[in-house]
Amino acid sequence: MLKGIGASDGIGIGRVMLVVEQSLEYVPKEIADTDAELARYQSAVEAFCAETVEQAEAIRKSTGDKEAEILEGHIAIIKDPFMNGEIENLIKAHQCAEKAVDQICQMFIDMFNATGDELTMQRATDVKDIRDGLLSILLGVQNVKISDAPAGTVLVTGELTPSMTAGINKDNIVGIITETGSQTSHSAILARALEIPAVLSVAGATTCLSSDEQVIVDGNKGEVITAPTPEQIEEYASKREAFLRERRELENFRGRETASADGIKYELFCNIGTPKDATKAMAADGEGVGLFRTEFLFMDRNSLPTEDEQFEAYKQASIIMKGKPVIIRTLDIGGDKDIPYLGLAKEENPFMGFRAIRYCLKNREMFKSQIKAILRASAFGDIRIMFPLITAVEELRMGKELVEEAKADLKASDIAYDENIKVGVMTETAASGVIADLLAEEADFFSIGTNDLTGYTMAADRGNGDVSYLYSPLQPSVLRMIRRIIKCGREKGIDVGMCGEAAASPMMIPLLISFGLTEFSVSAPSVLKVRKNISKWTKEEADAIAEKVMAMTTEAEITAYLETIV
Ligand code: PEP
Ligand code: MG
């Protein structure tokens, strides 16, 4: 049996599909027969172009013309006489095709990156894709296609990336196993959104599991059972049935108000990454969107989304939510979220670096175009803006100034928007917790991002297994932060929500009721479970639990106690 972190509930029984990034390393060689090498290079280019045409056609059908044109642009680049000529010159000078392709592409990548101009730098990403594509062909490296996975597949990979999830067919993938990631990593969030049982952080999974072997993925316990016996398969099949039955029972909570046992009402929102997810939020009976992670609109493409594209996405989400509140978080990149075409410099310490609101305030045009898109969409529903990673009042002020500037631009062009749009703060840093009293004076609402708040309070990276024993929202320090943020917000009369994963934790819910949280924002599949858990407690009971917990000194003591009451 292999141990990992159970990151998405459920049991999956199936056969392994290994998705391993293939190495593109090669040994440079002197070539004697340059004509034969030239012919090998030219046939690789032809194969690359044929593959690209095929991919572009598939993307044109699934996504649209614009995305297909990006890929077709790769053909124009590789057929460019200058670039092609330079590669052929190196081959004529007895370099092997791999080295010639690598060297010339790298020269273009460096040249484009050095301009510092965003559009030109995006070309560097294109050339990198071309280089990798050509090298894969020259080296005979095959990449597995997730979209071709047959029914009953358990996906095993180093890290689950958003582009991989794009290829997942939910009906065929019955489980996910990765080598990295934690409860709150994006792999986990994606797996939960897809309702696929997942076990993350399984050390050496891609080496100790082989394609086609049968495994059981126990996402509840964080275990992978290898070479299961017929008895184990039977046992887990009935566990899976029980799990699915419980899921069905939760249906009784559909269509109900979210309220505590003594009738205090709460808002129960969903976290989404794309407008499409809004459909899932509605289907899950979500009462709004508490966190729209807009970075997904910026990922898996080669250039920035335009203001119009963003406007359409935000408007669509609001329309799908039928005018229910939609809190749109402005771009939160950096840390564990990279967007290659932005050419972010590698940092020693990315989680403390140039990311999220910090990056946006320094890239004002890009930021303003996002804010304008959100404002324009606000004419179509109850849309609110939220800034991530705030650590100082000035950042909130600068963000709000930009909102005012964007409003003035729109007004001058006679474009409609919600003049009273609410601007809130995602309280997810230790600093924002400590100055929550100051921020509450100037923010229209708070939403507590416990995924990062836990990391920043405990100085423990959310994705690092070695320090995961520290990374818990039930740490006394984190609970004090949460209590303080809620208290400061409520004292100033603003709503305080929680959009971190802790909002869905049965152990955390009575504490949040006692502290005075007003809104819970969770993944769509958790909505009914959270509604059920909120309905279990009266305020008085929750207060008694919180009083006991806040008198305890260690996370272990707190967890042990809370386990006895849920
Ligand atoms: C958080 O930090 O709690 C959060 C909800 O945001 P993300 O997981 O996108 O960092
Ligand atoms: Mg965060």
Image: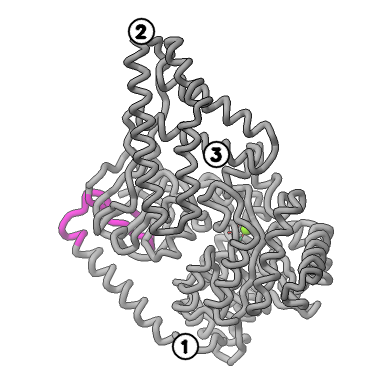
Query: Could you tell which of marks 2 and 1 lies nearer the N-terminus?
Result: 2
Question: What residue sits right under mark 2 in the picture?
Answer: 32
Magenta residues (range) = 214-233
Res 73 label: none
Amino acid type for the residue under numbered disc 2: Ala
Compared to 352, does 325 lie above or below? below
Q: In x, y percent, where is residue 315? A: 60, 72
Q: Are marks 2 and 3 in contact (CB under 8 Å)?
A: no
Q: In x, y percent, where is residue 285? A: 48, 81
Question: What residue sits right under mark 3 in the picture?
Answer: 125
Amino acid type for the residue under numbered disc 3: Thr
Q: Crowdedness of circle 1 by 10 Å Cα count: few (<14), some, many (20+)?
A: few
Residue in the image at 58% along x and 49% along y: 337
Q: In x, y percent, where is residue 360? A: 72, 53
Question: What residue sits right under mark 1 in the picture?
Answer: 255
- Please, which residue is most extreme toward the top here? 32
Query: Judging from the image, what secondary structure is the residue with disc 1 in?
Result: loop
Query: Judging from the image, what secondary structure is the residue with disc 3 in?
Result: helix
Residue in the image at 51% along x and 66% along y: 560
